[in-house]
Amino acid sequence: MTADFHVPGSSFLHRTDPRARLVALVGFTACFLVPGEPLPLALLAAACLVVVAGTLGLRQLGGLLRALAPVLAFIVILTPLFSRAGTVVVAVAGFPLLTLGGVRDIIIYLARFTGISAVFFALLRTQRLEELVLALQWFGAPFPAALAITITFRYIPFLAATWREVKDAHRLRGAASGPGPLMTAMVVKAVKSIPALAMALEGKGLGRSGPRTSLETLGPARRGAFHMAAAAAAFAAVMILLLLPVSRRFFAVPGL
């Protein structure tokens, strides 16, 4: 199973210490969950998308947006049904379809979902899974737990690649290409990969006791501390801006 999330590059995120990227992942995710105003949350989400485009390229950004599009559409359609507060904006036969409270909630939910997705996408696509294991272990996560997390991330692109392979194989053979046959072939291929995965885990010494060694190493501790401090300062500044009463009044949109 060689599929990986990592996209090689030389951007500032690629050069950032893996431990700092985990700190930024937690911190900026928390920024989107605070009770902020719609406008700054939307601006923060847009900034995260710009970072994705700048570090990974417009093609990767397009792939992320295509993957998020169905969920974003559901948010836009379903949120007004459960948010009735505020002035009615759109009504049909006296029935309010959209209120200002619904618009506010739509913006907040879109910003949160898009922003958090962009944060995870940018930080995990610029980090090799071997670095993620070492960073999680550095923060105290047991090796089996860190390995389970990385295997989960590796399985997502693996299953996507398997789906494409199975679909292409069915198309070349002129066989049925409906969901049923494709899913059956997917399950068979996934089951056949279990012995290889078990041997790989055994080769990595899963379950053994005693100290572990690794071919991969993290950067110098001083460099890691500097990067983690910079990441913490960045998301702390963003969170303060989101929560300060002065900035909340400044970014407040009348009616929302």
Image: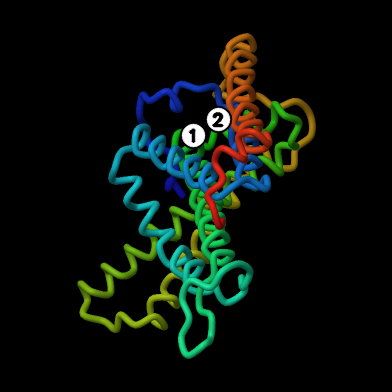
Q: Is residue 209 left or right of residue 56?
A: right
User: Mark 2: which amino acid?
Assistant: Glu
Task: Classify the position of the C terminus by image quarter.
Answer: bottom right
- Residue 12, percent from left and from top: 42, 23
**Res. 73 in view:** yes
At 28% across and 46% down in the image, what residue appears? 59
At 53% across and 86% down in the image, what residue appears? 95
**Res. 22 in view:** no
At 59% across and 31% down in the image, what residue appears? 238
When the figure is inspected, residue 129 is found, relative to residue 216, above or below; the finding is below
Q: Residues within 10 Å of mark 2 (few under 14, many from 20)?
A: some
When the figure is inspected, residue 75 is found, relative to residue 45, above or below; the finding is below
SS at mark 2? helix
Distance of label 1 from label 2 (alpha carbons): 5 Å
Which quarter of the picture shows residue 210? Answer: top right
- Find disc 1 in the rendering and name its residue: 128
Determine whether label 1 and label 2 are within 8 Å by CB.
yes
- Residue 74, percent from left and from top: 48, 70
Residue 175's tag is: none
Which quarter of the picture shows residue 250? Answer: top right
Residue 131's tag is: 2
In depth, the one of 209 and 56 nearer the eye is 56
